[in-house]
C-alpha cells in the first residue's frame, strides 16, 4: 500500500533536512514524500535541492500561504492510498511507517495516530494528563484542546473526499478544526508505540507566535455548530466549550483594552451561547 507523506515547511532550513531524512530512512519503502516550501526566504530551497532521492518531490510556493494551504497543496498533489503528515521540525523513528501502517490496516481504521516523544528546549518531557492521547470516539474530549498530533497522524484518502481539506481561513488551530470534523464521523485509532519525536519550545512555532489562539478555536466551534449534525450530548458539550473559550478570550481582550474586539466576538457567539 502506497503512503503519501506530506511535509509543509517555512524558513526551517536548519531543521527540515532532519525531518526529510527521517522519512527517507524508513524501513517501509512504498511511499512518496512531498515537501511544500511555503515561500521561505532563508536557504530552505538550497537544502531541499541538495537532497537527491526519486521518492522526494518538492513544491516551491512563490509566497507564504500558511500551513493549511501548504498541506492542502501537498495532499492534492499526492497519489497514495494513505496520507501521513509530518511537521518540518519533527522527525520519525525509522519503523514509524512500517509499524503504524500495519496497525492502521489491521484495525481497519480510517484515521489513526501514534504515541510520541516530547522534546522541549532540548530536554525530554512527559506530557501532562490533559495532553494524553485517547483512542476511539474522541470528539468531546477534543473540544478542550487538540488531541491529534499532525506528525503522528495517518488517514485514508477517502477521508479528505468526505470532509474536505484543512481550513485555509484559519491562521492557527487548523488541526484542532480538522480533527473535530473527523472525530464526529470516525473513531481515531491509537498505535501505542512512540514512533515520532516532537520538538517544541521554539519561538518560530505558531503556538509561540500567535497571541489569542482561542479565537481560532472559537471560529472552529461556531463552524461545527452551524454545519455539523450533533446529537444532544455533542451539542451541549460544544456550546459549553464555546462559552468557556469565548469568555476567556473576551476577558483577555478587556484586560488589554481591546474593547471593540471583545464586543465583536461577543456578538459573534450570541446565537449559540445564552
Image (cartoon, rainbow, N blue to C red):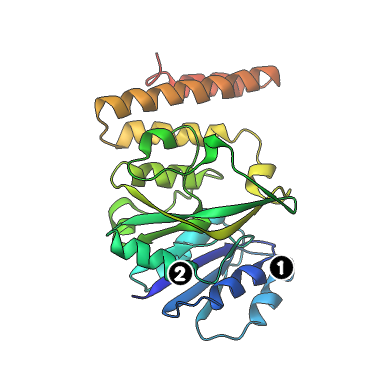
Q: Where on the picture, by quarter, is residue 252?
A: top right
**Height in image: 159 above or below 182?**
below
Q: Earlier in the sequence, mark 1 or mark 2?
A: 1
Q: Residue at x 35, y 55 (%)?
A: 111
Left or right side of 16 for 107: left
Circle 2 crowding by C-alpha within 10 Å: few under 14, some 14–19, many from 20 = many
Q: Give the farthest residue toward the front.
A: 192
Residue at the image position 65 percent from the left and 67 percent from the top: 16
Secondary structure beneath label 2: helix
Q: Secondary structure at mark 1?
A: loop
Crowding around mark 1 (Cα neighbors within 10 Å: few <14, some 14 to 19, many 20+) is many
Can see residue 156?
no
Viewer-proximal residue among 240 and 166: 240
In the rendered image, which quarter contains the N terminus? bottom left
- State left or right for residue 247 relative to residue 200: left
Q: Nearer the viewer, mark 1 or mark 2?
A: 2
What residue lies at 67% left-to-right and 82% top-to-bottom?
50
- Residue 49: x percent and y percent? 65, 81
Q: Is residue 21 visible?
A: yes
3D distance between C-alphas at marks 1 and 2: 24 Å
Residue shown at the point (33%, 22%) measured from the top left = 236
Question: Which percent across, then down, holds residue 80?
Answer: 37, 72
In the displayed structure, would residue 72 be above or below residue 181?
A: below
The spot of residue 179 in percent (x, y) is 41, 46
| Location of residue 20 with respect to 155 vertically, above or below | below
The residue carrying mark 2 is 97
Left or right of 109? Residue 122 is right
Provide residue 59's location: percent of width, then percent of height.
54, 73
Q: Which mark is residue 13?
A: 1
Q: In the image, 73: left or right of 37?
A: left
Amino acid at each position: 500500500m502506497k503512503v503519501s507523506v506530506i511535509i509543509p515547511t517555512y524558513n526551517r532550513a536548519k531543521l527540515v533536512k532532519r525531518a526529510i531524512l527521517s522519512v527517507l530512512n524508513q524501513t517501509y519503502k512504498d511511499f512518496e514524500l512531498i515537501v511544500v516550501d511555503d515561500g521561505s526566504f532563508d536557504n530552505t530551497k538550497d537544502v531541499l535541492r541538495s537532497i537527491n532521492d526519486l521518492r522526494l518531490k518538492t513544491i516551491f510556493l512563490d509566497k507564504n500561504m500558511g500551513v493549511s494551504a501548504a498541506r492542502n497543496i501537498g495532499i492534492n498533489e499526492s497519489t497514495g492510498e494513505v496520507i501521513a503528515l509530518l511537521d518540518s521540525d519533527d522527525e520519525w523513528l525509522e519503523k514509524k511507517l512500517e509499524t503504524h501502517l500495519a496497525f492502521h490496516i489491521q484495525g481497519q481504521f480510517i484515521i489513526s495516530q501514534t504515541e510520541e516523544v516530547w522534546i522541549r528546549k532540548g530536554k525530554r518531557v512527559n506530557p501532562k494528563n490533559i495532553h494524553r492521547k485517547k483512542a476511539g470516539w474522541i470528539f468531546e474530549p477534543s473540544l478542550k484542546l487538540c488531541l491529534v498530533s499532525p506528525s503522528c497522524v495517518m488517514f485514508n484518502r477517502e477521508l479528505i473526499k468526505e470532509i474536505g481539506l484543512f481550513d485555509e481561513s484559519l491562521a492557527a488551530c487548523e488541526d484542532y478544526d480538522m480533527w473535530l470534523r473527523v472525530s464526529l464521523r470516525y473513531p481515531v485509532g491509537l498505535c501505542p508505540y512512540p514512533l515520532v519525536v516532537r520538538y517544541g519550545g521554539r519561538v518560530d512555532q505558531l503556538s509561540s507566535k500567535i497571541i489569542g489562539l482561542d479565537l481560532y478555536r472559537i471560529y472552529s466551534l461556531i463552524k461545527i455548530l452551524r454545519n455539523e449534525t450533533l446529537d444532544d450530548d455533542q451539542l451541549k458539550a460544544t456550546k459549553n466549550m464555546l462559552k468557556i473559550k469565548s469568555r476567556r478570550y473576551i476577558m483577555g481582550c478587556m484586560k488589554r483594552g481591546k474593547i471593540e474586539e471583545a464586543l465583536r466576538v461577543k456578538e459573534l457567539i450570541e446565537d449559540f451561547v445564552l
